[in-house]
Amino acid sequence: MFPSNYNRARIALVQRALNEMNYNHQGYVELKIDGAFGNQSIGQLKLWQTAHGVEANGKYEDYTAACIEAFMNEHYLTEQDYRAAAAANGIEYALLRAIVEVESTGGGTLPDGNPKTLFERHVFYREVREIKGKEVADKFFAANPNICNPASGDYGSVNSQWSRLQKAIALAEGDVGIIDAAYKSASWGVGQVMGFNHKVAGYATIGAFVADMMKGERYQLNAMVKFFVDNPKLVKAAKELDYATIAKFYNGSDYQRNQYDVKIRDARKQYV
């Protein structure tokens, strides 16, 4: 069904593309991005073909393949993108791929096209407290404990994170400072760079950072790499393959709870 050079990772990109391209169509079912193109994936391919006036034969060829390939080339990072970013910045290609895979399961966008984020309610509480005071932070906490809370946790699904961010923005009622606090409280894109690290990632303002994260994965990768190389301890850990230190930078001091160091180590093996 696929060309001989299509491995599971490449087929997983096709599944991602179908999720985004079919998102607003009747009959859409979100595919699991696993590189196993079974009956459900074939059904979603047929849905795309029907919507575009193509014979719904479920075959990845001719016009169907050309259109989906064009979509993927425009929206998703290629192996060449990763290799170029790694070479230009002195980062091992395999390690870069592994970190992206662990942090964002290999992709920086959601099926609806919005950037993949993780909203940290405890960071939002901290940011609001710093700019507006404890009284305002506690007011938000009392009314919306899942959005503003001194304690971390209660994240919900990956697809729910964008709506959690929007709820935080709604609490601002137009206050730019609180809106910025909400943006700073989320991690963004393929590298899941926290918004409050926007300056380390090369952006003078959080607004400029968010604008680029919305543009797509190539901008997200650039921000991730800039964050990476501007941290000497992280660069040193990468050269030494010190997975514990790498995981601590990306996932905090309790990284061991979810074995992020082990996950990065194991993910790297497939790209070496």
Image (tube, rainbow, N blue to C red):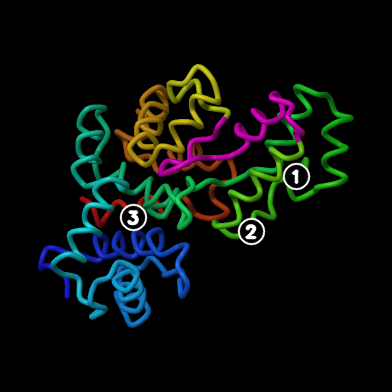
Question: Which kind of residue does numbered mark 3 sit on?
Answer: Ala
Residue indicated by mark 1: 151
Instruction: Tell me which numbered mark, 3 or 1, is placed earlier along the sequence.
Output: 1
Of badges 2 and 3, the one in the foreground is: 2
251 relative to 234, above or below: below
- Judge the density around disc 2: few (<14), some (14-19), many (≥20) Cα neighbours within 10 Å: few
Kind of element beneath mark 2: loop
Question: Which kind of residue does numbered mark 1 sit on?
Answer: Ala
Write down the region rendered in magenta.
Answer: 172-195
Residue 165 picture location, percent across and down: 64, 44
Q: Is residue 232 left or right of residue 197?
A: left
Q: In which quarter of the image is the N terminus?
A: bottom left
264 relative to 26, above or below: above
Nearest the eye: 32 or 153:
32
Kind of element beneath mark 3: helix
Q: How far apart are marks 2 and 1 (CA)?
A: 15 Å
Q: Residue at x 70, y 36 (%)?
A: 124
Residue indicated by mark 3: 267
Residue indicated by mark 2: 156
* Membership of 190 in magenta stretch: yes
Q: Distance between the residues labelled 3 and 1?
A: 30 Å
